[in-house]
């Protein structure tokens, strides 16, 4: 996949996120990571997953990527990770 194709896939995923969830505005959630950030205990990580904040959403997507079984599944999950990062950046800029 070329760089242009990768970026096109991320843009497509961002559009799909907006279509599925609408505009997203969440707190960053960084304060819940603590001053050192990851690694965290599993229970703390799970609590972030169930919160609607960007840190939790991103960690959940990264966790899914780390569990991918095939190169295609990993590619799809990494595109979702990248799209969440873009979405977070967009939200940050709007504040």
Image (cartoon, grey):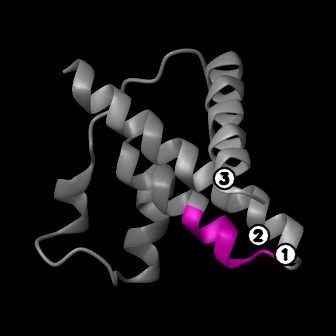
Residue 66 in magenta? Answer: yes
The mark that comes first in sequence, 3 or 1, is: 1
What residue does disc 1 label? 71
Can residue 15 be seen by looking at this rendering?
yes
Identify the residue at image location x=72%, y=42%: 9
Q: Where does the magenta region start and end? A: 62-68
Q: Position of residue 41 (x, y in %)?
A: 38, 83
**Mark 2 vs 1: CB contact within 8 A:** yes
Characterize the local packing of mark 2: few (<14), some (14-19) or many (20 or more) Cα atoms within 10 angstroms: some
Q: CA distance from mark 2 to mark 3?
A: 9 Å
Can residue 51 be seen by looking at this rendering?
no
Helix, strand or loop at mark 2: helix
Looking at the magenta stretch, what is its main secondary structure? helix
Helix, strand or loop at mark 1: helix
The mark that comes first in sequence, 2 or 3, is: 2
Q: Which image quadrant is residue 53 in? A: top left
Identify the residue at image location x=56%, y=59%: 60
Q: CA distance from mark 3 to mark 1?
A: 12 Å
What residue does disc 2 label? 74
Characterize the local packing of mark 1: few (<14), some (14-19) or many (20 or more) Cα atoms within 10 angstroms: few
Q: How many marks?
A: 3
Identify the residue at image location x=46%, y=23%: 24
**Disc assigned to residue 87:** none
State the residue in front, 48 or 69.
69
State the residue in front, 88 or 27.
88
**Mark 3 vs 1: CB contact within 8 A:** no
């Amino acid at each position: 996949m070329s760089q242009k194709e990768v970026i096109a896939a991320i843009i497509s995923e961002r559009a799909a996120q907006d279509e599925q969830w609408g505009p997203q505005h969440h707190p960053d959630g960084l304060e819940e990571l603590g001053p050192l950030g990851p690694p965290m205990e599993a229970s703390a990580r799970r609590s972030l997953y169930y919160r609607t904040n960007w840190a939790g959403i991103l960690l959940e997507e990264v966790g899914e990527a780390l569990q991918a079984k095939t190169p295609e599944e990993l590619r799809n999950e990494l595109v979702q990770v990248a799209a969440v990062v873009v979405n977070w950046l967009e939200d940050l800029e709007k504040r």
